[in-house]
Image (cartoon, helix red, strand yellow):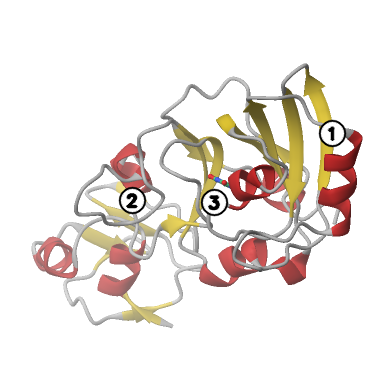
Amino acid sequence: MERLDKILVSQGIGSRKEVQKLIRSKSVTVNSELVTKPETKLDPDEAEICVKGRRLSFKKHIYLMLHKPSGYVSATEDNLSATVMELVPKEFMRKGLAPAGRLDKDTEGLLILTDDGDFAHRLISPKSKVYKRYYAELDFGITEDDVRKFREGIELDNGEKCLSARLEKAGETSAFAEICEGKFHQIKKMFAACSKKVLYLKRVSIGGLKLDGNLPKGECRELTKTEKDALFIGI
Ligand code: URA
């Protein structure tokens, strides 16, 4: 059982103050009965809640796929740069919504946003062995030695050791790289350890979920149940 005002805030209806005002102004019904007390307790999975006559489809958590463009930082707040949160339409906005993991400001591609902290942790944690696949354009082509180094675990210039990673040739000077951890600038640093500079980087998939080719850059949409599960496939 949860407070009505808390439920409405969690669903992005408004701030605590705003939803309390809505409730007191007789705009909310629960199971067709007018409810004017914000502290009323109910089970959001069972009750039919309507706000201004519109039925609320209660979701405990939200899971979004964003096609991140270059130029946005993967954070909820930043003093200097635009954040990925600015790309989230109002109807998806929720308390606690945040990117699950980070892509650099100049990296494009698949970014998951959710207000489900446990889920985000599971997706990011190297222990989960969820591989993130990147397409990279480089200043030089990769060699068999680079593939071996990735597989054996690259040692970064600060001495940090990376877990085993997959590397495969895409074109003359491009490659696909897969890692299951997320150290700061990891892919760029791994290529740097092979004397290569990353000129362009895009995340193309996470686990068994590919970036939707029809999702324009800068846009996001909710994941389907199948897509959400696919994130943990292929582990
Ligand atoms: N590795 C990087 O270097 N940058 C990213 O954005 C993601 C992984």
- 25, 98: nearer the viewer: 98
Q: Dot 1 lies on which element?
A: strand
Residue at which label 3 appears: 185
Q: Which numbered disc covers residue 105?
A: none
Q: Quadrant of residue 133?
A: top right
Q: Dot 2 lies on which element?
A: loop
* Other-residue count near label 2 (Cα within 10 Å), few / some / many at <14 / 14–19 / ≥20: some
Alpha-carbon span between mark 3 and mark 2 = 28 Å
Tell me if 75 is positioned left or right of 235 in this view. left
Tell me the kind of residue under disc 3: His
- 105, 124: nearer the viewer: 105
Residue at which label 2 appears: 93
Q: In this view, does 109 lie above or below 112?
A: above
Q: Which numbered disc covers residue 168?
A: 1
Asked whether the viewer can see residue 63, the reply is no
Q: In this view, does 81 lie above or below 22?
A: above
Q: Nearer the viewer, mark 2 or mark 1?
A: 1
Return the disc, 3 or 2, that comes first in the chain's sequence.
Answer: 2
Q: Residue at x 69, y 48 (%)?
A: 193
Mark 3 Cβ inside 8 Å of ligand 1: yes
Return the disc, 2 or 1, that comes first in the chain's sequence.
Answer: 2
* Other-residue count near label 3 (Cα within 10 Å), few / some / many at <14 / 14–19 / ≥20: few
Tell me the kind of residue under disc 2: Met
